[in-house]
Image (cartoon, rainbow, N blue to C red):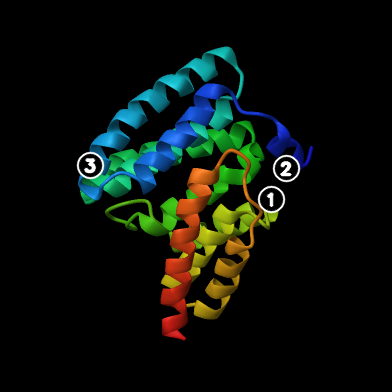
Amino acid sequence: MGSAAFAAEPLPADIVQLQHDWAKANYHTPEKEQEKAFEALAERAHQITEQHAQSGQNAPEAMIWEAIILSGYAKAKGGLGALKQAEKARDLLLAAEKANPQALQGSAYTTLGSLHYKVPGWPLGFGDKKKARAYLEKALQINPNGIDPNYFYADFLSERGEYEQAIQHYEKALAAPARPGREDADAGRRQEIEAGMAEARKKL
């Protein structure tokens, strides 16, 4: 079954609501209030994951969204105290990958990749640039035109000083087709893409 088939399957309302609440917390909440917003959202996401695990329906999708929210919580929290949330997110994503690697068009790989280049490496954390590249490239194999895998790969490449290739993926992310029902997330992501691309162009 191809990724397009998975993309066409409608998500249940509780996961759709998590997507919108994540976009609100990530893009429309003042920075000083984000940690509290993500903490509450992570608790609700965990309850939803448990419910889907019990029902056997959309469990990988729920795990991926709990992990995305935990990643946002870790970012808002910052410092070594955020590693606990990052590790939880990683474990959820690995479980989701095992259950259905194609879920949400390979979003487990996109988020695993972003975690592995943003989290500190050994001995503090599990960050690993080689794993990050491999996960992000796998995400692009599944969803080559997607806004998120192209954005995160571009951001990773820019961090690595590979600016020309980064700009190519920023441009591809900007050209990505709109995601029905995800207008709030797309708008916020496009702002991040434009900012990242402007920074990368300065470095050329």
Say if mark 1 contacts mark 2, CB within 8 Å: yes
Which of 11 and 82 lies nearest the eye of the viewer?
A: 11
Helix, strand or loop for disc 2: helix
User: From where the camera sits, is residue 89 visible?
Assistant: no
Above or below: residue 12 compared with residue 7: above
Helix, strand or loop for disc 3: helix
- Residue occupying the far bottom of the picture: 204
Which of 125 and 197 lies nearest the eye of the viewer?
A: 197
Q: Are there few (<14), some (14-19), or many (20+) residues within 10 Å of tag 2?
A: some
Say if mark 3 contacts mark 1, CB within 8 Å: no
Which of the image's four quarters has the N terminus? top right
User: From where the camera sits, is residue 93 visible?
Assistant: yes
Find residue 91 and report its horizontal and vertical position in percent.
44, 37
Q: Which residue is mark 2?
A: 3
Above or below: residue 113 compared with residue 158: above
Q: Which residue is mark 1?
A: 142
Q: Are there few (<14), some (14-19), or many (20+) residues within 10 Å of tag 3?
A: few
Which of 131 and 12 lies nearest the eye of the viewer?
A: 12
- The mark lying in front, picked from 3 and 1, is 3
Q: Which residue is mark 3?
A: 33
- The mark lying in front, picked from 3 and 2, is 3
Give me the C-alpha separation between circle 1 and circle 2: 7 Å
Quadrant housing residue 149: bottom right
Instruction: Give the residue drawn at x 28%, y 47%.
Output: 76
Quadrant housing residue 40: top left
**Lower sequence index among marks 3 and 1:** 3
Circle 2: residue type: Ser
**Lower sequence index among marks 3 and 2:** 2
In this image, 126 relative to 82: left or right?
A: right
